[in-house]
Image (cartoon, rainbow, N blue to C red):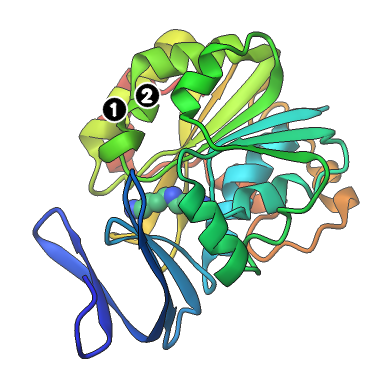
């Protein structure tokens, strides 16, 4: 919700709200899927907002994008082919393409308006759109993946919340198709919502992924702009374990300049508070 006094407010579950003061609106549109806005905030840089929900902003996007991309890519020992479902702002692609081992990265975003608006107004996030290894498809990711078998080393589901067109990305048929689309030693990560607000969803998601993948669990991160501050990613893998198979030396040798991710965070992020352990119970398979 944008109001006259230049505050954008995201209302969460009709019970709390996060507001950001902004200087101007850079882009405002309505696609067949959603409303899309980019605003210039007072203190959080440019911010992408879909359906009045903050997707990403310049001030803290590095946390989300480094964690969704480098945890899987430093777990898989030789990732060559990657798929991003969603991720139209380009931040996840930017991080994936830092890995020179990646030869091809497909990005399947349902909404071309998001990509085009970010290309124009959020260049620091969408800085890898011209990388020749990146191929963008404006399609429904859930449909796209049905036709891929044994194809990708790593799949990253960079989705919005499980409302609207993205809801299917949290459901069993989609996870079965992700499993099929991965090579025999492939692995995936997915936007996993707030462990504080979405305990029921996390439990369902882990049950879903845990029935399909031999290894499944959550890892956490903190940011400034998502309700509750502490958020998570789902990690699911056919073979490689994110801690036992992780070679910390690869992170150092990469010489990437991270702002959040490092070898210690990679491992620590899988530690869970007591309420999460209790919630996820024996389904925790890591
Ligand atoms: N509550 C909003 C969660 C949005 C997660 N996806 C963000 C996309 C960043 N590339």
Please indicate, yes or no, whether residue 225 appears anywhere in the rendered image: no
User: Which residue is situated farthest in the left direction here?
Assistant: 15
Residue 174 coordinates in the image, percent (x, y): 42, 18
Which residue is found at the position 64% from the left and 68% from the top?
Answer: 123
Q: Is mark 2 within 8 Å of ligand 1?
A: no
Q: Specify few, some or many for label 1: CA neighbours under 10 Å numbering under 14, 14-19, or 20 or more.
A: some
Which residue is found at the position 27% from the left and 61% from the top?
Answer: 52
Q: Is residue 44 above or below residue 275?
A: below
| Disc 2 to disc 1: CB gap under 8 Å | yes
Q: Is residue 113 above or below residue 83?
A: below
Residue 209: name its quadrant.
Answer: top left
Identify the mark at residue 107; answer none if there is no mark: none
The residue where tag 2 is placed is 206
Residue 258 coordinates in the image, percent (x, y): 72, 62
The residue where tag 1 is placed is 203
For marks 2 and 1, give the CA distance: 5 Å
Report the front residue among 58 and 113. Answer: 113
Report the front residue among 63 and 84. Answer: 84
Q: Is residue 149 left or right of residue 42?
A: right
Q: Is residue 129 left or right of residue 238?
A: right
Which residue is found at the position 64% from the left and 41% from the top?
Answer: 71
Which residue is found at the position 68% from the left and 21% from the top?
Answer: 240
Residue 59 coordinates in the image, percent (x, y): 52, 74
Q: Is residue 231 left or right of residue 118?
A: left
Q: Is residue 215 left or right of residue 103?
A: left
């Amino acid at each position: 919700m944008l109001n006259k006094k230049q505050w954008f407010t995201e209302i969460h579950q009709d019970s709390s709200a996060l507001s950001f003061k902004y200087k101007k609106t850079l882009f405002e549109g309505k696609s067949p899927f959603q409303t899309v806005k980019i605003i210039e905030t007072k203190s959080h840089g440019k911010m992408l907002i879909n359906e009045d929900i903050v997707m990403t902003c310049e001030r803290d996007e590095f946390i989300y994008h480094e964690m969704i991309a480098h945890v899987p890519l430093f777990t898989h020992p030789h990732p060559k082919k990657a798929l991003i479902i969603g991720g139209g702002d380009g931040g996840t692609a930017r991080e994936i393409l830092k890995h020179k081992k990646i030869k091809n990265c497909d990005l399947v975003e349902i909404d071309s308006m998001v990509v085009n608006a970010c290309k124009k107004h959020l260049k620091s996030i969408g800085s890898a759109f011209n990388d020749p290894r990146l191929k963008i498809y404006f399609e429904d990711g859930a449909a796209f993946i049905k036709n891929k078998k044994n194809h990708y080393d790593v799949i990253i589901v960079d989705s919005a919340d499980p409302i609207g067109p993205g809801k299917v990305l949290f459901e069993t048929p989609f996870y079965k198709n992700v499993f099929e689309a991965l090579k025999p030693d492939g692995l995936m990560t997915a936007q996993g919502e707030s462990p504080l607000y979405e305990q029921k969803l996390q439990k369902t998601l882990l049950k879903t992924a845990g029935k399909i993948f031999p290894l499944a669990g959550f890892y956490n991160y903190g940011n400034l702009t998502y309700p509750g501050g502490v958020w998570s990613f789902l990690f699911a893998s056919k073979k490689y374990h994110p801690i036992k198979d992780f070679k910390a030396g690869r992170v150092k040798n990469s010489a990437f300049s991270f702002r959040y991710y490092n070898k210690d965070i990679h491992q620590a992020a899988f530690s869970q508070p007591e309420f999460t352990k209790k919630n996820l119970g024996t389904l925790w398979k890591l």
